[in-house]
Image (cartoon, rainbow, N blue to C red):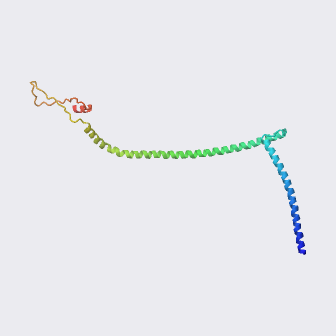
């Protein structure tokens, strides 16, 4: 029985301690809540002042403090902005350099490609030039065969003696007669 009573007292004491601790905690929470609520209100009021609202309640000294705070904030903002801009500029300069180097490499490759193409064209045309004289002679002979008139009747007058007879042993004098259809260079060749 003593053991049971002892256990009962122990549990009841522990329960009292828990209840008292809980009530203290509740009191602490209420106190903490009031503190946090006051902080939130102060921060909201400060934010309104920074946004330019509710300035009627501020006196001259508070307005000057607010102005100094805004100026220092602006300095920090501008310094951060210029730092970001400088970083951006340096990054763009690095990109520009890399693109210029890449462009130079591509230009060199393009030039070497063009030289290679020119060499290949030269190698292709060289065999054609070697064959050109043979082709020219065969094509010119075929041209002559096609373009030459069928038969030219060029007659040479025979010298006549005073009595109307022929002169023996006289060589005929070539005198080309113009024939329609012969080019002038052929006529000059025939007359010489």
Quadrant (top left, top right, bottom left, bottom right) of the N terminus: bottom right
Between residue 95 and residue 20, name the one nearer to us: 20
Q: Quadrant of residue 4?
A: bottom right
Residue at the image position 48 percent from the left and 45 percent from the top: 110
Q: Position of residue 126 (x, y in %)?
A: 36, 45
- Residue 178's place in the image compared with 56, above or below, is above
Quadrant (top left, top right, bottom left, bottom right) of the C terminus: top left
Residue at the image position 47 percent from the left and 45 percent from the top: 111
Number of numbered markers? 0
Q: Position of residue 68 (x, y in %)?
A: 79, 41
Residue, far bottom: 1
Q: Is residue 49 left or right of residue 137?
A: right
Between residue 189 and residue 5, name the one nearer to us: 5
Q: Is residue 161 left or right of residue 115?
A: left
Q: Is residue 36 left or right of residue 145?
A: right
Q: Quadrant of residue 138?
A: top left
Q: Position of residue 71 (x, y in %)?
A: 76, 41
Q: Position of residue 100 (x, y in %)?
A: 56, 44
Residue at the image position 61 percent from the left and 44 percent from the top: 93
Residue 192 in sight: no
Residue 62 in sight: yes
Between residue 183 and residue 92, name the one nearer to us: 183
């Amino acid at each position: 029985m003593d053991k049971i009573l002892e256990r009962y007292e122990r549990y009841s004491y522990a329960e009292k301690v828990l209840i008292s601790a809980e009530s203290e905690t509740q009191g602490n929470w209420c106190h903490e809540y009031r503190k946090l609520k006051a902080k939130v209100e102060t921060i909201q009021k400060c934010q309104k002042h920074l946004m330019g609202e509710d300035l009627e309640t501020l006196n001259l000294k508070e307005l000057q403090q607010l102005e100094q705070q805004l100026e220092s904030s602006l300095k920090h903002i501008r310094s951060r902005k210029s730092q970001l801009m400088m970083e951006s500029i340096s990054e763009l300069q690095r990109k520009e350099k890399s693109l210029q180097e890449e462009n130079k490499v591509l230009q060199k490759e393009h030039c070497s490609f063009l030289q290679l193409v020119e060499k290949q064209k030269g190698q292709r045309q060289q065999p054609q030039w070697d064959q050109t004289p043979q082709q020219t002679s065969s094509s010119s002979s075929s041209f002559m065969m096609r373009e030459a008139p069928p038969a030219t009747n060029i007659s040479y007058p025979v010298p006549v003696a005073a009595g109307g007879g022929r002169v023996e042993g006289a060589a005929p004098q070539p005198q080309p007669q113009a024939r329609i259809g012969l080019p002038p260079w052929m006529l000059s060749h025939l007359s010489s």
